[in-house]
Image (tube, rainbow, N blue to C red):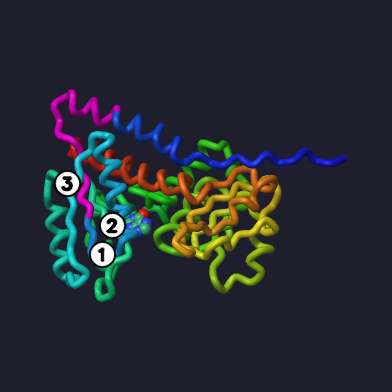
Amino acid sequence: MSSSPIETVIVDGLALANEIRDDLAQRIKAHREAGRRAPCLAVVLVGDDPASASYIKGKQRACARIGMDSVEHRHPASTGEKELLDLVDGRNRDPGIDGILVQLPLPEGVRANAVTEALSPEKDVDGLSPVNQGRLLLGEPSHRACTPLGVMKILERYAIPLEGARAVVIGRSALVGKPVSLLLQQANATVTMCHSRTADLPGTCREADVLVAAVGVPRLVQRDWVKPGAAVIDVGVSQVEGKLVGDVDTEGMQGVARIVTPHRRGVGPMTVTMLLSNTLDAYEAHLGE
Ligand code: GUN
């Protein structure tokens, strides 16, 4: 008896993001109608990396569309660590600011860890400060990192079972690999974290019911790495000959994966949406103080 062919669903991350953003906009509208100020996100960009500049523009545009304010702090690549720490300290103390986003990567000579450590955990809407990452590790409430949270929302929306599932995460970054592994484990998946020294990466990936690729190696994950019926989440973004390419050979997933995220309109819009959601949560907590 032959099994029926798998109809691979291409995840529409933009549609899901828009649905969630509509709910966030409604929440903000209700606050405004009650006479409260708009929530406000401070966005910090250091240096002139074009990709980072484009990301923060997108984040600010997304804020404006749901009625959230944002203030931009742009600094040259020559900005020193002390100056940046002072800026973060000022925004931590500013009662008109609910969330702070420091776009990464930071220029050489500025320690990203020193900057994220300086963020007030309540305003760290990116979920990258040691306190928020530590709370995630302990399973305590905190702002969760935006891309991992977006991945979990996609899995939830597409009804991917996680309880008892085998999840494999490629990449061990603090931004994605580590936090998404913890979130999957907290959802009762059995998680394997892979990295550049993993022996038999393709074989390990073939065991996955849920495969998350977050390494930035163009088209690393090939069709024969994927177990039939697996959910494949592509977080990687690389430039190849001027084109954006993910960590997954998306076309190769057809007929094998149950769902796959495209490298455009996949995880990206959900990352931005989770930033908005965390900022609105921070605002509401701030109001309640
Ligand atoms: N650079 C790439 N992704 C992110 C992100 O989610 N947050 C921050 N702060 N910087 C990034």
Residue 101 seen in render: yes
Q: CA distance from mark 3 to mark 1?
A: 24 Å
Quadrant in which residue 5 is drawn: top right
Answer left or right for 264 relative to 35.
Answer: right
Q: Secondary structure at mark 3?
A: loop
Q: Give percent across and percent down for residue 217.
A: 52, 65
Q: Secondary structure at mark 2?
A: helix
Quadrant in which residue 64 is drawn: top left
The amino acid type, in three-letter code, at marker 1 is: Asp
Quadrant for the C terminus in the image: top left
Q: CA distance from mark 2 to mark 3?
A: 21 Å
The amino acid type, in three-letter code, at marker 3 is: Ile
Circle 2 residue: 53
Q: Give percent across and percent down for residue 116.
A: 27, 61
Residue 134 seen in render: no
The tag on residue 48 is 1
Examine the rendered structure and indicate whether residue 274 appears above or below residue 119.
Answer: above
Query: Upstream in the sequence, badge 2 or badge 3?
Result: 2
The tag on residue 97 is 3
Q: Secondary structure at mark 1?
A: loop
* First to last magenta residue range: 26-43
Quadrant for the N terminus in the image: top right
